[in-house]
Image (tube, grey):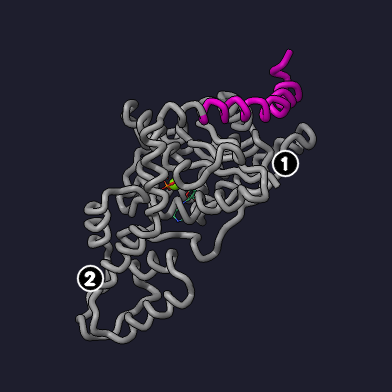
Amino acid sequence: MRVLTGIQPSGDLHIGNYFGSIKQMVDAQKENDTFAFIANYHAQTSVKDGKRLAELTMQSATDFLALGIDPQKSTFWVQSDVKEVLELYWVLSSFTPMGLLERAHSYKDKTAKGIAANHSLFSYPVLMAADILLYQPDIIPVGKDQIQHVEIARDIAIKFNNEYGDIFKLPEYKIEANVATVPGTDGQKMSKSYNNTVNIFGEEKKQLKTIKKIVTEAVPMEEPKEYETCNVYNMAKLFLNENECKELQQRYKKGGEGHGHFKLYLHDIIWEFFKPYREKREYYAAHQDEVREILLQGAHKAKEIVAPTIDKVRTVTGIKY
Ligand code: ATP
Ligand code: MG
């Protein structure tokens, strides 16, 4: 099966990105035809500093490779290196009813948080539909926040296919129920653009500082504490097996420990978990030319794969004359 994912280089990659998307991709590589890209056009909706966007693009690519995207097994590229996606974005715009975009949660959430309501943020789901449909994938692994966007891509594909025949495969999302929405330090969805992330590759001191910032219930040390609703527990459980989860639940129920103790524990398990990846990251950080070469080869492969689809689109829509 063909599996596709994209991540915006809109900030440091965080544990929500890891469990919601990256890990699922890495696991999928074993048995599938996998496609992963750095969505730098998408990131322009939030990153206006050009130098920073360029840096974040390389940083995200480096992180992705360190976390196990294998260029031998996956096609891995930067979105803007395959410009056909912008062409398809425009073509699909004429198959996108305004109402479909007006109902998009992500747009509403982001503008409610003060991110400028410009046209690119509004039409983001159309570019995402182009990202997906161009590659004819079967499955899109996502966090819960992106389900609606995959559904929008499907709706747009249906409209297009109704007009011109079966050009696009209808994509389906795949979601891991227990990691659907990783909470941020403020309890809301962890997001690069919300300043509430626990990063995958932060410095140790900074990570600890971030974890200490996690919002928790005010309960006296000696009393039992709720774990189901606790942001610290809900992050910790991502890294723990069933027995370890039960042990942590017991510590919450027993009382005698404060959230400060649970936070230290959380810090340790996250730091340990990403240790082998940090070592791999150091390698790629020191070999940026190798990363660039991988991205170029990936883009080359991606361009070959999209050629028949974009050609069909140009023909049926009459752009090819
Ligand atoms: P931004 O704030 O710029 O939108 P983001 O942190 O939401 O960034 P994206 O690049 O939009 O990250 O999303 C990349 C992938 O990570 C998507 O598949 C998305 O569903 C997943 N993802 C993002 N945040 C979370 C989260 N908190 N929990 C689970 N999955 C997530
Ligand atoms: Mg997002």
Residue 2 falls in image quadrant: top right
Classify mark 1: residues with Cα within 10 Å, few (<14), some (14-19) or many (20+): some
Query: Which span of residues is magenta-colored?
Result: 294-321
| Residue furthest right as drawn | 165
- The image shows residue 44 at horizontal and vertical percentages of 41, 32
- The image shows residue 141 at horizontal and vertical percentages of 58, 51
* Residue 9 visible, this angle: no
* Residue 145 visible, this angle: yes
The residue that disc 2 covers is 260
Kind of residue indicated by mark 1: Lys
Q: Residue at x 23, y 60 (%)?
A: 213
Tell me which secondary structure the magenta stretch mostly adopts.
helix
The residue that disc 1 covers is 169
| Residue furthest top as drawn | 321
Spatial CA span between label 2 and label 1: 50 Å
Q: Disc 2 vs disc 1: Cβ atoms closer than 8 Å?
A: no
Residue 88 falls in image quadrant: top right
Query: Position of 40 compared to 272: left or right?
Result: right
Picture layout, residue 91 above or below residue 189: above
